Image: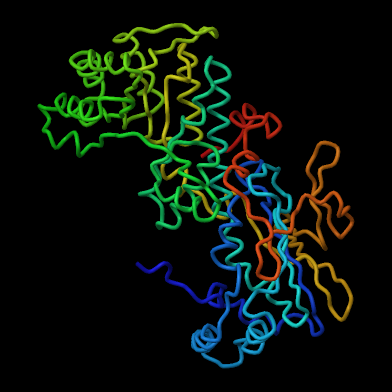
Amino acid sequence: MDSHPIDNLILLGDCYKSSHYKAYPPGTTNLYAYFESRGGKFPYTVFFGLQYILKKWLCGPVLTKAMVEEAKEVINEVFNRDDVFNEEGWNHILEHHGGRLPLRIKAVPEGTVLPTKNVLFTVESTDPAVPWVTNFFETVLVQAWYPMTVATNSHIYKQIIQHYSNLTSDDHDMVEWMMLDAGYRGASSVETAAIGGAAHLINFKSSDTMAGNPLLRKYYHLKGVAGFSTPSSDHSTVTAWGRDNETNAHRHMSDSYDNGVVACVCDSYDVFKCLEETWCGELKESVLERGRRGGRVYLRPDSGDPKEIVLKSLEILGKGYGTEVNSKGYKTLPTFVRIFQADRITHNTLWEVLENIKTHGWSSGNVFFGAGAALLQQVNRDTQKCAYKVSSAEVNGKCVEVYKQPITDTGKTSKKGRLTLQHDNGNITTIQSGQGDPSKDLLVTVFENGVLLKDYTFQEVQDRASLSPSHFNIEEYLHNGDME
């Protein structure tokens, strides 16, 4: 199988980037740029994914003579002229750096949770002969927006689940299992699914996006796997038995995986009849027997309004299997049976479901969830308003602050000069114009002249992203935030 349709470093950039080397002021010897979340849907960012980009595209000798020759042909045709391609500049990198990129990249450690509107990484050229390389690789470096946005998106799910667990549950150990990544089939590509799936696994251990595990194994030193799944039926495995044999379909699935956990979709025809007559009726003894062996059945109502369907399903199962009241005064089903809701789950519907069952006296620990498109695909670069901007240049030996300040959109005003990220007075702050204290800078040099200087493990990333009350007030966000 082809590993990737693009294998030429020079063709990773936007077309117009190829023309910029001539556009900077004569005498420019250094460019310095930064990447940030300018705000957006979420009030903070979980930073993740830069290491994947660096290892995949920029580490080591990544430029060859054949690439230069191919790029010259392609770019000359793209622009329909022969005065755009920077053949001399690329050959300089090849001849003077052995094909390694003369760049220095400093970044906040991956997994760090920090407020938006702060610098996340900086990039600068290290060879005065080719300062333009700083901005040329904006295109591929900005793609860090995707893993960090999914990691943040997933982190919000976890905060909502943890919030309701704190209110209604005695056992918080299952929180990290309570949101399954069901987004693989809805992702735009296998690579997208792998990146997004890996980002979700920073926060949760449940995933059906298989591709996330090998990405973490290859780029983040994961041993084994980080995401786990459960044998589960789907509509084809149920409906293949015919409408009159639905109970036999569920019995067969349960018998085929008669130990541990199993999940069964229940809405092929009449979800309430299935729960009441099949799972609380004909198959009740098998569920009880599984429970006696320490197993569990996840029953999946997969259509309808989640807020109403989950509550009604709990009421049916509570009637069929009985309930206990925990120390916080909320009903819990026996440990061997749970609801699994994986349809139409967004931050808003998750909140609605959990608030509704709480109102009706049920613990959040009775319900596990899955998210698909809303987790991996319903995000874009503007979800967190991610931007990469040059903020400093050296021209004829003089440092020049570079910034934009459009009167039509002040939210796009960019930062000036060299930046430091500092933790002062309990707050993380970006200091501009070279006024920061380098000894306090939270940014770490992760890449220099083609060499990766920091190689984070998945465990390190996951530990940094662990939930903390200091991240932000989830309850305030639930009531005031735009969660759709």
Horizontal relation, residue 231 to residue 108: left or right:
left
| Residue at x 42% of width, y 6% of height | 324
Q: Residue furthest bottom?
A: 82
- Name the quadrant containing residue 227: top left
Q: Nearer the viewer, residue 258 or 432?
A: 258
| Residue at x 39% of width, y 13% of height | 333
Q: Nearer the viewer, residue 220 or 282?
A: 220
| Residue 349 drawn at (x, y percent) | 46, 31
- Name the quadrant containing residue 293: top left
Say if 420 sits above or below 303 in the image.
below
Quarter of the image that includes the N terminus: bottom left
| Residue at x 59% of width, y 48% of height | 457
Say if 304 sits above or below 73 in the image.
above
Say if 329 sits above or below 364 in the image.
above
Colour scheme employed for the rendering of this structure? rainbow
| Residue 277 drawn at (x, y percent) | 20, 16
Count of all numbered marks drawn on residues in the image: 0
Horizontal relation, residue 118 to residue 460: left or right:
right
| Residue 425 drawn at (x, y percent) | 86, 37
| Residue 42 drawn at (x, y percent) | 62, 42
| Residue at x 87% of width, y 51% of height | 439
Q: Nearer the viewer, residue 59 or 427?
A: 59
Say if 408 sits above or below 223 in the image.
below
